[in-house]
Image (cartoon, rainbow, N blue to C red):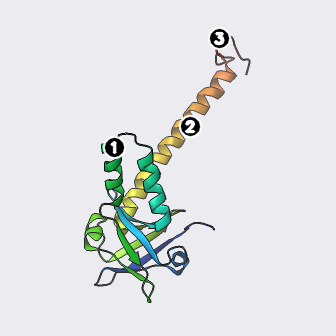
Amino acid sequence: MLGFVGSFEHTMDAKNRLFVPAKFRDGLTGKFIIKSFTSEYPCIQCFRIDDFEKAAAEAADKVDNPYRRRVKLAKAYLGAAEVTVDGQGRIAIPAQLMKDARLDKEAVIVGMGEYVEIWNPTVLRDFTAVVDQLSLKEEDAVMHEESIAIERIANGDFLQAPGGSSDGV
């Protein structure tokens, strides 16, 4: 199955209900998990129950220390909520998750492959601006490294291979 792809803008109603696009409803049938992802750019993440439980278990299994394992599980499950799409194609988002994600009236629903994210449009714009800036910096760094490599080759300077001999490239 092709994962969740695309983004959709919707308005929340007075009861914190959000319309789930038909394109995503097939993958989020029955009950699924929503959870706030808190950071400088918060959002709500929506997972199929099996995917959520598998990811939480895998994260906890990677930790040997019982206390740290408990903390990992707490981070995964605290604040998570089971929701179901109603007959009108909406989900009700708990007030605390709304607050955590800075959601008000408008929301953007974004497919992230294996899961879905729900964003405040302003927070999403701020986040994508930061991502764009980081991408440009990365691209600039790669282009700089490539220009140095081209200049070295043009000048007959070659990188030293392990052991100190020239590799001739």
> Would you say the residues marked 2 and 1 are in contact, meaning their CB atoms lie under 8 Å apart?
no
Residue at point 41%, 49% (across, down): 60
Label 2 SS: helix
Q: CA distance from mark 2 to mark 1?
A: 42 Å
Name the residue furthest right.
168
Q: Which residue is mark 2?
A: 142
Q: Which residue is mark 3?
A: 163
Above-or-below relation of 105 to 42: below
Disc 3 marks a residue whose amino acid type is: Gly
Residue at point 31%, 79% (across, down): 16
Q: Which residue is mark 1?
A: 66
> Would you say the residues marked 2 and 3 are in contact, meaning their CB atoms lie under 8 Å apart?
no
Residue 157 seen in the current view = yes
Q: Residue 55 shows which numbered tag? A: none
- Which one is in front, 46 or 33? 33
Disc 1 marks a residue whose amino acid type is: Pro
Whichever of callouts 2 and 1 sits on the residue coming sooner in the sequence is 1
The quarter of the displayed image where residue 121 is located: bottom left
Disc 2 marks a residue whose amino acid type is: Val
Above-or-below relation of 49 to 61: below
- Which one is in front, 86 or 127? 86
Q: Position of residue 84 (x, y in %)?
A: 42, 79
Query: Which image quarter holds the C terminus?
Result: top right
Q: Position of residue 146 (x, y in %)?
A: 61, 33
Q: Residues within 10 Å of mark 2 (few under 14, many from 20)?
A: few
Q: Residues within 10 Å of mark 1 (few under 14, many from 20)?
A: few
Q: Position of residue 86 (x, y in %)?
A: 42, 85
Label 3 SS: loop
The quarter of the displayed image where residue 67 is located: top left
Q: CA distance from mark 2 to mark 3?
A: 26 Å
